[in-house]
Image (cartoon, grey):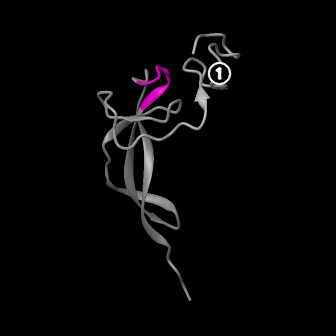
Amino acid sequence: MFFLIGGVQPKTILVDKQARSCPACGHFEVFLKRADHYVSLFFVPLFPVKKGAPFLFCENCRTVFDERGYKMGVEQTVSERRCAHCGRPVNPDFAFCPYCGKAI
C-alpha cells in the first residue's frame, strides 16, 4: 500500500529587507511580507501556485497593515505589553521600560 500526502499550503516570505516603523506602536522592526500558496508533497513546498498581497506585520503589537500603513483584517488582542523600543515584555503598570529605560 502506498500513500501520497499533498496539498496546498501557505508560506510567508520576506519581500523587502528594509525595516519600517509600525504605524500603531512605533516599533521599528516591521518588514514587508507576503503569504504565497505552494503545492506541497509530504509537507515540503514544491512550487508556487498563487502569490499573496504584500502586508506589514508588527511582532510587537500583533497588528497587520497593508503596504501603505492602513490596518487590515481583524485585530488580534495583545496578551502582554511590549516596549516599542527594545521589544521586551513589560508590566502594564510601568511607565518606563526596565530593560532599556525609555518611556513606554
Q: Where is residue 93 in the image (x, y as percent from the top left)?
A: 65, 21
The quadrant of the picture occupied by the N terminus is bottom right
Tell me which corner region of the image, top left, top right, bottom left or bottom right, holds residue 70.
top left
Quadrant for residue 17, please give it. top left
Q: Farthest front residue? A: 93
Please tell me which residue is depicted at 46% across the width and 58% down the height of the picture.
45
Our reading of the magenta stretch's main secondary structure is: loop
Residue 80 position by quadrant: top right
Indicate the secondary structure of the residue bearing disc 1. loop
Where's the C terminus, which quadrant?
top right
Instruction: Check residue 28 for magenta coloring.
Output: yes
In the image, is residue 7 above or below residue 94? below
Kind of residue indicated by mark 1: Asp
| Residue 69 in magenta stretch | no
Residue situated in front as seen by the camera: 15 or 26? 26
Extent of the magenta region: 24-31
Name the side, left or right, on which 73 lies relative to 43.
Answer: left
Residue at the spot x=46%, y=19% of the render?
26
Q: How far across and down, in percent of the image, does residue 12 sit?
A: 44, 45
| Residue lying farthest to the bottom in this orientation | 1
Q: Report the front residue among 59 and 77.
A: 77
Residue drawn at 67 percent across, 25 percent down: 91
Q: Where is residue 34 in the image (x, y as percent from the top left)?
A: 38, 42
Residue hosting label 1: 93
Position of 6 with respect to 2 (left or right) is: left
Residue 79: where, in percent of width, then height?
59, 38
Residue 80 relative to residue 67: left or right: right
Nearest to the observer: residue 28 or residue 96? 96
Residue projecting furthest to the right = 98
